[in-house]
Amino acid sequence: MEKNEGNKFYAVPLIGGILCNFAFFGNNIIIIPFLLSGLPPFSSLGFPILLLALAFGPVILDLVLGILMIVSAVKMKNRKTTLFEEKKKLLIFSWVVIGVSLGLSIFNLVLSRAFLFFHEPGLVGGLIIILGILFYKFVSKHNFIFGPPLVQEGEKIDPRPTKEQFLSIVHIFCTNCGFKYEKESIRFCPECGNRLVSK
Amino acid sequence: MALVFSWEPNLFSILYSTLWIFRDVVLVIWAITTMKKENKPKFTSLLLVAGIFLLSWNIISIFLPSVGIDYFLFPDEAELDMFTTIYFLYSFIPVVLHFFLAVVLVVYIYNVSYHYDKKSLIGPALFLLGNIIYICFNAILYFILLSIDFTDYATLNLLDFLIGVELMTYIVADLILVIGFSFIFIYSIYRNDALLIMFCSLYFAILMLSLFRIINNTIIEFYSW
């Protein structure tokens, strides 16, 4: 087998971001003909502005999120960040993009009375990032999703607090009602529900 | 002339073909980088050949016009023959090229990692199965198209049924391809090779896009109001 030369996962958010940008460009062919035609809902002045706000806003969101995905992929390639740090951001972005593409498909269904689904690239880009992170969880020996990050070349990670430091934090005192409980550490006050502090 | 040749590129078709070309370029670069390694696995030159064939076909297919029969004119026999041959070429060349790519991938993955991990052949095998289904149904459709009498109005009604069957079989075949390629996607992440991951995710994206497109076309064909 080949030598393990660092994490090459940056390819997945790169392709996902490119596909999200494609969703922005593919959308224009359905909206622009409606804007240019003088059909009844679009002949009035007010409606096209509403349409612009409804249709172009989410798709511009697709474009911006795609660019941010590509930026994070390039950062991962240059060893500035790791997948563990970018994972949450990437997952949120991809879910937003999937929601936008599905919502706009329903919007087009209402507008044109046919299921015109021109935002598939965004859906597919988001799905690829989610599936890639899921597949990484299956494939990697380290538990990458819920466990500690993999240490990469040229990267410095602060030492984790030891077990003794964890145990030294004892929540006993309530700042609201003055409740004290000295036997063991509990998180919330049984009297008033306030968060306990370590005094 | 009852045949209609039209070349109407729009933004979506241009983006779609750029995706295909991007995938083929990544495949070619990956094949070249694997050939430069010291312990290069067998049959990598076949990968390069498949990539170059696919790239050249996808570049040519941008400039090819689409063919249709005029709605108000009956075609002659010569025109019908021309239509069927063009239909045959347009549908068969990419399918045969992808079948070749699937065979090459099966051979490559068998040589590289079958002895370490016997599950790694699931993905390429499913991919090959989907391509075989594609080829079989294309051949059946072509022979039906040859046997149809276009001047007879009664047998012409068969075309509606045929379009439905074609769409449904394409959905099934594309589902098998997507499932198979998801296994290859996992394999590429396991190998931790950036170009291989890029190629696999791009091809996976294209397969899912074509699947959604076919489902979309069936919805528009049968259930639009």
Image: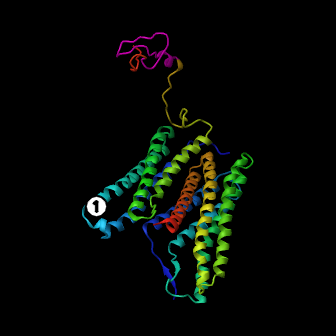
- Residue in the foreground of this view, choosing between B42 and B8: B8
**At which x and y percent is residue B209?**
52, 60
Q: Quadrant of the C terminus of chain B?
A: bottom left
Q: Secondary structure at mark 1?
A: helix
Residue at the image position 60 percent from the left and 63 percent from the top: B51
**Callout 1: few (<14), some (14-19), or many (20+) C-alpha neighbours within 10 Å?**
few
View extreme (right): residue: B115
A193, above or below A32, in the image: above
Q: Is residue A80 left or right of residue B120?
A: left
Give the chain of mark 1: A
For residue A56, what is the image quadrant?
Answer: bottom left
Instruction: Label the magenta part by its dominant secondary structure.
Output: loop
Q: Position of residue A45 (x, y in %)?
A: 24, 63
Residue A59 lies in quadrant:
bottom left
- State the residue in front, B115 or A119: A119
Which residue corresponds to the image point at 36% horizontal and 57% vertical from the top-left?
A55
- Left or right of B159, for residue A78: left
Question: Is residue B42 depicted above or below A41 in this figure?
Answer: above
Locate residue B173, reporting x and y percent: 63, 62
As for residue A172 lying within the magenta part, the answer is yes
- Magenta stretch: give its range: A164-189
Direction left: furthest residue: A45
Say what amino acid the circle numbered 1 marks.
Answer: Phe
Q: Residue at x 63, y 72 (%)?
A: B92
In the image, residue B217 lies in the stretch drawn in magenta: no
Q: Label 1: which residue?
A: A47
Position of A157 relative to B16 (above/below): above
Horizontal side, residue A165 vs residue A142: left or right: left
